[in-house]
Image (cartoon, rainbow, N blue to C red):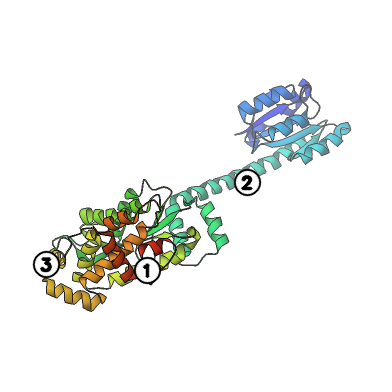
Amino acid sequence: MWKVLIADDEPKIRRGLRNSVHWNELDMEVTGEAEDGEVALEMAKKLQPDILLVDICMPFLNGLQLIEQLNSILTGCIIIVVTGHDEFTYAQQALKLRVFDYVLKPVSREQLRSVLDKAREELMSCSARNKYLNWASSQLKRNLPFIRELFMNGWVNGHKTEMEIREQMNFLGLTFDENSGMLVVKVLERLNKDELLKEWDHHLLLFAVQNIVEELLEQWQPNVVFRDNKDNIVAITPVKQTSEWMTLGMLIQAAVEKYLKQVAIICQMEIDGGVLNAPSIYENLIAEINERGSCSPVVLLAKKYIETNYYREDLTLEDVAQNVQISPTYLSRLLKQEIGATFIDYLTQVRVKRATQLMNDPAVKVYEVAKSVGYNSQHYFSTAFKKVLGISPVEYRKGGKGNG
């Protein structure tokens, strides 16, 4: 039943309006009557009527003042003005306040029935629209993760303009820290840490990996985690401290190995110049993922072991060979064939790359960086750094880019 409130200072008029029509036939009910504008305002707040029949000339608070206040309180209420011929100018002013319609005194049954019929149609139409909007809103909420994934894929693949990115980020409730970074996680399903492990369903495995990533990134807000069109798990997170953020990759890799018994490649890079540069960073990370994932299983496992243990000063070819269960000589030959580098060369590349990431934090001293990546001697570190990039760590920190 639609609720109706009648506001008029004349009891005779109120009685006439109440008795002029069969309200039940209109699926309406008169739930309140008010003799002045102030009473009407309080009753409207309490009863939340769907229809308000209001006289213009009332004491304390006239009809126009009442309507103006109600416009900010009742969003869906239909207001019908009841006015006399000599109040027509006021009725015109009321129409400017977005009232639905008006009826002239003395109000005939036919006139009142006609305007109430129109009001009912409008209420039914609004109700239908609201139901649709509520349904659409619930569907949007339910499908928001999927819609975000579609948007992120379009964005990182360069299919969105800057205006589209900003508008859709706002619509989807996505925010990013000024200093952000991107991680890409690739699971190598042809490798696992347990040959007796039952083979994973592909989509279930990706779902499990994404859950691990999301859980480990809970403290790195705001972030977004999604699956790209190449079945990689991609994350954009704030970078609080470069060294801590780089550790995230190792944590994710270790968790995937521990809980899923799978080998994963993790590539990560800070996004210079703001998140609008995400597509170029994504392209670079995908290229790195593809390059690292193209090797034979033995070399992949060897590289993974090196990338996990690069910080050990005493890391040797023999250690890596023992871990992947082949001879050092055979491993050395495979590394040279597949990645074009000796064990020492690759270890140095990994250490220097990690060092450049750590050096983005100006608070970290060069000797601290050297120690963090496996060099006890700063001089030896500088020599290795210059061999890879063509410039010293000090020159690099001053803004040089080197050969790498």
Q: Are marks 2 and 3 in contact (CB under 8 Å)?
A: no
Instruction: Read off the residue under disc 1.
Output: 391
Residue at (86, 36) in percent of width and height: 89
Disc nearer the start of the sequence (2/3): 2
Instruction: Pick the residue in front: 351 or 102.
Output: 351
The amino acid type of the residue labelled 3 equals Gln
- The residue at the far bottom in this view is 337
Q: Residue 246's image quarter?
A: bottom left
Instruction: Read off the residue under disc 3.
Output: 325
Q: Please, is residue 402 above or below residue 100 in the view?
A: below
Residue at (83, 39) in percent of width and height: 92
- The CA distance from mark 2 to mark 3 is 74 Å
Instruction: Read off the residue under disc 2.
Output: 125
Element type at mark 1:
loop
Quadrant (top left/top right/bottom left/bottom right) for the C terminus: bottom left
Name the spot of residue 188 as percent of width and height, x first.
26, 65
The amino acid type of the residue labelled 1 equals Ile
Residue at (71, 28) in percent of width and height: 6
Whether residue 303 can be seen here: yes
Name the spot of residue 397 as percent of width and height, x first.
41, 61
Does 207 sit left or right of 92 as displayed? left
